[in-house]
Image: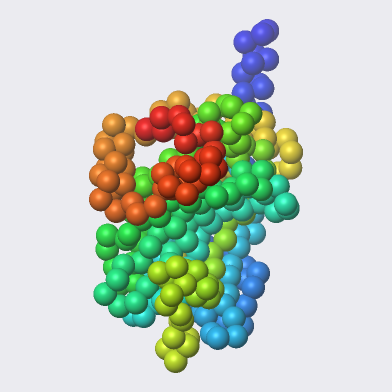
Amino acid sequence: MRNIEAFLITLLVSTFLRDLSSVDAALSNNIYFYWGAQRGRITAGDDCELILHKHGGSGITSKASFLYGSISMRMKLVPGNSAGTVTAFYLSSFGKRHDEIDFEFLGNVPGQPYIIHTNIFTQGRGKREQQFRVWFDPSKDFHNYTIFWNPFQVVWLVDGTPIRVYHNYHDPEINFPDSQAMRAFASLWNADQWATQGGRVKTDWSLAPFTAKFQDFEMKACVWRGPKSIHYCTINSPTNWWTDPMYSELSDSQLSRMNSVRKEFMIYDYCRDPKRIINGDLPKECSILSY
């Protein structure tokens, strides 16, 4: 009887979870413009174009919210002189104590690379930036950017290569995004007060409009159905593939590739910021071996 009861519970949970992680793949069916709809469009091929004018930018967000899984987007960034512009792809909840996981792409002058700016907010606290020089031209072709998020870690990936990991240390002094649903967002906006070379280079509005393109929005994730999802999205089951222990850390191959990227292309790490070290302003995770 106990085995039958366990089987029925497993079947019920599996059915529930299958519904949670099932999302239609068409971009136009899964996003809407939350900002600057008049400056963006969905193309006939189901791609999205976000446009930035001097009067404002534009942004899209997913209709669904998620707790754990893999969220990815293929993006083609602003070409030419993109200085002052920021193209973003990120996950975020809402409120003062929100969680957020960021990819931001800081434009630059011709001949200088885009900068990948990553950050994570937990319970409203951010200031965990890491930055990388892009090792390819992200405006020439579409490239895949993925945020993988499970109860063990958050991983930022570029074309399948991890560039950063934020671990769940199960430490009350090191918050982890494990209880708030987040939506996916993409946006294009002006940030010339800080984005390019510390704000020294401003946006050249004579080159406007600026356009960033998006396609293949993929959500292999647990769809939020309310607070009960905190339990159901965390259950270790075949449907919840992200909870498999094999995803609790990077593989040796992934770790090797990530370390190569970080060694050659990382230009800023909040844990190594001299000012923060001098001021004693480093979060506790900076004192723990990460990789």
Q: Is residue 285 visible?
A: yes
Instruction: Residue at 53% x, 40% y: name it.
Output: 280
Task: List the single residue furthest toward the front.
Answer: 278
Q: Residue at x 67, y 31 (%)?
A: 231
Q: How many circles with numbers are drawn on the protein?
A: 0
42 relative to 216, above or below: below
| Residue 95 left/right relative to 137 | right
Picture quarter containing residue 180? top right
Q: At 50% across and 46% down in the image, what residue appears?
A: 276
Q: Residue furthest top?
A: 1
Residue shown at the point (57%, 77%) measured from the top left: 57
> What percent of the width, then of the height, locates residue 142?
35, 66
| Image color mode | rainbow
Say if residue 16 shows up in the picture.
no
Q: Is residue 238 shown above or below 216? A: above
Image quarter of the N terminus: top right
243 relative to 92, above or below: above
Q: Quadrant of residue 234?
A: top right
Q: Quadrant of the C terminus?
A: top left
Residue 277, position as x, y percentages in the image: 47, 42
Residue 165, x across and y down, in percent: 43, 40
* Closer to the camera in the image, 290 or 217: 290
Residue 124 percent location from the top left of the image: 66, 48
Q: Nearer the viewer, residue 171 or 241?
A: 171
Toward the viewer: 224 or 198? 198
What is the quadrant of residue 32 in the picture?
Answer: bottom right
